[in-house]
């Protein structure tokens, strides 16, 4: 299922506004379950969880910051 540019922009906003706070809560919960590990372990856990959070949504965020490829080119008169 291919998403249009407009729907990808909308979904990326929803993912950032809803998914990112949920990720933060989950990441902090995982680190708290480890009973305060050394700082390098804690950093590694946050990095791994960050990449795991990003991978499923890569197709949604790809190209969102660019101009709409489906839009008509502006006419120069």
Image (tube, rainbow, N blue to C red):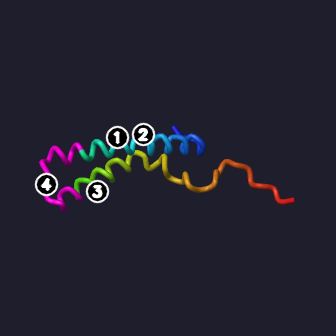
Between the C-alphas of marks 2 and 4, the distance is 28 Å
Q: Which secondary structure dominates the residues rendered in magenta? A: helix
Where, by quadrant of the figure, is residue 37 drawn? bottom left
Mark whose residue sits in front, 3 or 4: 4
What is the distance, in whole Å, between disc 2 and disc 1 at their CAs? Answer: 7 Å
Among the two numbered marks 3 and 4 on one chain, the one whose residue lies closer to the N terminus: 4
Q: Nearer the viewer, residue 9 or 59?
A: 9
Q: Quadrant of residue 16?
A: top left
Q: Residue 47 got which mark?
A: 3
Q: CA distance from mark 3 to mark 2?
A: 20 Å
Q: Is residue 13 above or below residue 67?
A: above
> Going 18% across and 46% down the picture, which residue do you hit?
32
Q: Are marks 2 and 1 in contact (CB under 8 Å)?
A: yes
Mark 1 vs mark 3: give the one in front: 1
Q: Position of residue 34 (x, y in %)?
A: 14, 48
| First in residue order: circle 4 vs circle 1 | 1
Disc 4 secondary structure class: loop
The single residue placed furthest to the bottom in the displayed view is 40
**Residue bearing the label numbered 4:** 37
Q: Which residue is mark 1?
A: 22
Residue pointed to by mark 2? 18
Q: From which residue to which does the magenta span run?
A: 29-43
């Amino acid at each position: 299922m291919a998403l249009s540019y407009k729907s990808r922009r909308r979904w990326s906003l929803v993912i950032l506004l809803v998914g990112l706070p949920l990720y933060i809560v989950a990441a902090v919960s995982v680190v708290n379950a480890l009973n305060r590990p050394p700082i390098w372990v804690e950093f590694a856990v946050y990095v791994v969880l960050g990449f795991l959070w990003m991978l499923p949504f890569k197709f949604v965020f790809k190209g969102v910051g660019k101009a709409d490829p489906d839009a008509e080119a502006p006419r120069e008169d």
